[in-house]
Image (spheres, helix red, strand yellow):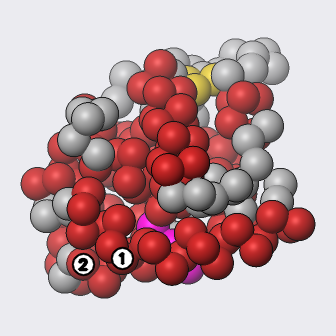
Amino acid sequence: MLENITQLKRTQEFQDVFTYMTSILGNEFPTLEFTPEYLILSILDNIKCHANMVMDNILMSESMDYLRTYYHGQLMSMDRKPIMNNQVQTANKELTNLMVSAVKEAKGMKSSLICTEHILLALVNPQNSFNSAKALLEGGLRYNYIISQTQGLSQNNSTEASRSY
């Protein structure tokens, strides 16, 4: 359930991305069940989140545009479950597994908070093999390189603990 995700200790930038996913993308592409593609597009659409900044430093602008278009197309073509009479929106199994993997990434980086860069790391970690990450990997995102790029971000996020959500 989405409730499990909202109970995680997370940074404000993660909260902003999550809110964008559930409210903006949830309205644009109504669904009962959120998938990792929703979260990835939320990251791509939020240029101030850490994962977006890391991707922007690694990829060319055309690649970022391609990824936005690709994930937008994925949501457009997805067989979404419509919302009926106050039904509770949930996370599908892959999104739930992604969040579990992101928690592991955060712990591995000695961060007490979940940040968007932990989502990105979980997506491209070769041990996870998420179907939704295929375009990210084909675009050139590599786990070890992202780790080297995010070392400072995670250390800075530990100081945000008092402002966690």
Gap between marks 2 and 1 measured at Cα: 9 Å
- Which residue is labeled 2 in the image? 58
- Which residue is labeled 1 in the image? 149
Is residue 149 something that shows in the picture? yes
Task: Kindly state the secondary structure of the residue where label 1 is placed.
Answer: helix
Q: Label 1 is placed on what type of residue?
A: Gln
Q: Quadrant of the C terminus?
A: bottom right
Residue at 81% across / 64% down in the picture? 161
Q: Quadrant of residue 49?
A: bottom right
Image position of 64 (left or right of 26): left
Q: Which residues are magenta?
A: 47-51
**Does residue 157 belong to the magenta stretch?**
no
The image shows residue 109, relative to residue 60, as above or below, that is above
Q: Quadrant of residue 16?
A: bottom right
Task: Kindly state the secondary structure of the residue where label 2 is placed.
Answer: helix
Q: Are marks 2 and 1 in contact (CB under 8 Å)?
A: yes
